[in-house]
């Protein structure tokens, strides 16, 4: 093994159930000290991936390597307990008849005093030093979760596989436990593969997000890049509400109520969708003296009428109907802003925040700029 050998590698994993490929040719690698996050909607194949890597399920095609050693392929199948992999699943059942110390020490091998020392060390790490003699039913949900983490880390796994491990916790507690878990795992330098269907969790935890859909990884990258440069509309929509503005390419440009968009390399007649997240719209009471510079960064303000405004706690969400074509647009601002329904406002969109993507032909909306 060299320093650049990933801790964990999956190579071309494919898994079929009843003739359907639920995991299709998926490859990934996780270096030491990195948290990679398999993110995708329910049923896209995340848990299946994790189960194959853990060794509790077997792929139909492909291989799994741990620190350069093949633990699973067409010929080899190393059992789960010999893969140096820690597991934390959604329903992380603690043994109810064992104390906290008994749970954390379960499965550790070696002299008693060494095991006891290891258990103490682990409980310290998760801030449960005084809890060794308690039983699971005496603990809160968060404390149980921390015991489960201590138990998973006690055998010093080189890799940690986590399947929606925080989903049983309520919101406030969840953030706290996530952060604690992350700092413990980082301190250990463990390679982590975390499965979740929640974008917020992935954004919060991951160094790298592997966005999964229908058995495939459709995009991988740092959270910032995945959020700001989605591969397609579905990827954009997975992280927030989106607004979609339709247009047709003419002379390498697309005309919209928000001004002209450059669409270089797209042939005339191509249907495009301009996608913008609600927080990247700007609302103004007037046209703001913006001259007729249809290609400037801020584009052209377009008139819209407020339909509904709601205060959401950290932001206000305002829903508009565009005067131009009656389409709906959502915008958010990080403040209290609750204009009355019927209020006309001017909306503009930041060019550098839009995603312009070709799409299949729209059959419904008439194009007012046509002809
Ligand atoms: P996720 O974890 O992303 O929600 P899963 O990996 O659990 O998705 O499941 C992916 C697909 O494979 C689902 O359609 C699920 O019903 C199917 N599946 C998973 N495990 C089995 C199994 N043992 N037998 C049959 N189908 C399965
Ligand atoms: Mg799952």
Image: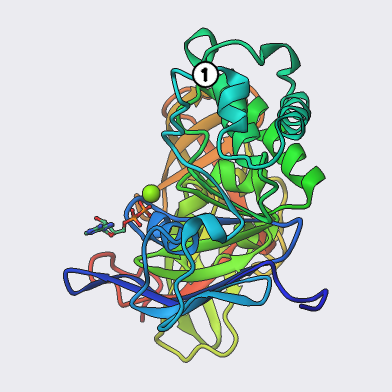
Give the vertical position of 255 relative to 169 (above or below).
below
Structural crowding at the residue carrying mark 1, measured as other residues with C-alpha within 10 Å and reported as few (<14), some (14–19) or many (≥20): some
Question: Does the closest atom of ligand 2 sit within 8 Å of the Cβ of label 1?
Answer: no
Residue 223 image offset from top left, x and y in percent: 66, 55
Q: Label 1, secondary structure: give it.
A: helix
What colour-coding does the image apply? rainbow
Quadrant in the picture for residue 227: bottom right
Residue 269 visible? The answer is yes
Give the vertical position of 44 relative to 278 (above or below).
below
| Residue appearing at x 33%, y 77% in the figure | 60
Nearer to the camera, 271 or 53: 53
Residue 32 image offset from top left, x and y in percent: 75, 61
In the image, 340: left or right of 313? left
Judged from the image, the quadrant occupied by ligand 1 is bottom left
In the image, 5: left or right of 26? right
Residue 38 image offset from top left, x and y in percent: 52, 57
In the image, 221: left or right of 122? left
Look at the image and tell me in which quarter the C terminus lies.
Answer: bottom left
Nearer to the camera, 72 or 26: 72
Look at the image and tell me in which quarter the N terminus lies.
Answer: bottom right
Furthest residue in direction front, as rendered: 111
Q: Which residue is mark 1?
A: 141
Total numbered badges shown on the rendered structure? 1
Residue 173 visible? The answer is no
| Residue appearing at x 76%, y 38% in the figure | 183
| Residue appearing at x 72%, y 36% in the figure | 111
Furthest residue in direction left, as rendered: 18
Residue 37 image offset from top left, x and y in percent: 58, 55
């Amino acid at each position: 093994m060299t320093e650049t050998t990933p801790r964990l590698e999956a190579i071309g994993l494919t898994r079929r159930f009843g003739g359907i490929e639920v995991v299709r040719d998926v490859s990934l690698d996780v270096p030491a000290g990195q948290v990679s996050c398999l993110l995708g909607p329910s049923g896209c194949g995340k848990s299946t991936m994790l189960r194959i890597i853990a060794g509790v399920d077997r792929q139909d095609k492909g291989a799994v390597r741990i620190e350069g050693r093949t633990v699973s392929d067409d010929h080899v199948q190393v059992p789960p307990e010999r893969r140096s992999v820690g597991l934390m699943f959604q329903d992380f059942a603690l043994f109810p008849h064992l104390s906290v110390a008994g749970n954390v020490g379960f499965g550790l091998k070696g002299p008693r005093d060494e095991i006891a020392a290891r258990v103490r060390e682990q409980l310290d790490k998760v801030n449960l030093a005084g809890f060794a003699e308690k039983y699971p039913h005496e603990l809160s949900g968060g404390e149980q979760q921390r015991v489960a983490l201590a138990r998973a880390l006690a055998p010093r796994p080189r890799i940690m596989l986590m399947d929606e491990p925080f989903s049983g916790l309520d919101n406030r507690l969840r953030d706290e436990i996530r952060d604690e878990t992350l700092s413990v795992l980082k301190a250990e330098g463990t390679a982590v593969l975390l499965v979740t269907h929640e974008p917020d969790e992935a954004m919060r935890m991951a160094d790298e997000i592997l966005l999964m859909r229908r058995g495939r990884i459709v995009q991988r990258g740092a959270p910032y890049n995945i959020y700001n440069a989605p591969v397609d509309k579905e990827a954009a929509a997975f992280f927030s509400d989106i607004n979609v503005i339709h247009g047709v390419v003419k002379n390498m440009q697309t005309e919209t109520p928000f001004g002209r968009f450059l669409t270089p390399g797209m042939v005339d007649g191509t249907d495009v969708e301009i996608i913008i997240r609600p927080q990247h719209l700007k609302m103004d009471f007037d046209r703001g003296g913006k001259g007729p510079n249809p290609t400037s960064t801020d584009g052209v303000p377009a008139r819209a009428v407020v339909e509904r405004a709601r205060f959401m706690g950290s932001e206000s969400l305002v829903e508009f109907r565009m005067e131009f074509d009656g389409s709906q647009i959502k915008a958010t601002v990080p403040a209290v802003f609750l204009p009355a329904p019927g209020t006309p406002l001017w909306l503009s969109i930041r060019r550098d925040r839009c995603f312009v993507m070709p799409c299949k032909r729209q059959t419904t909306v008439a194009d007012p700029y046509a002809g």
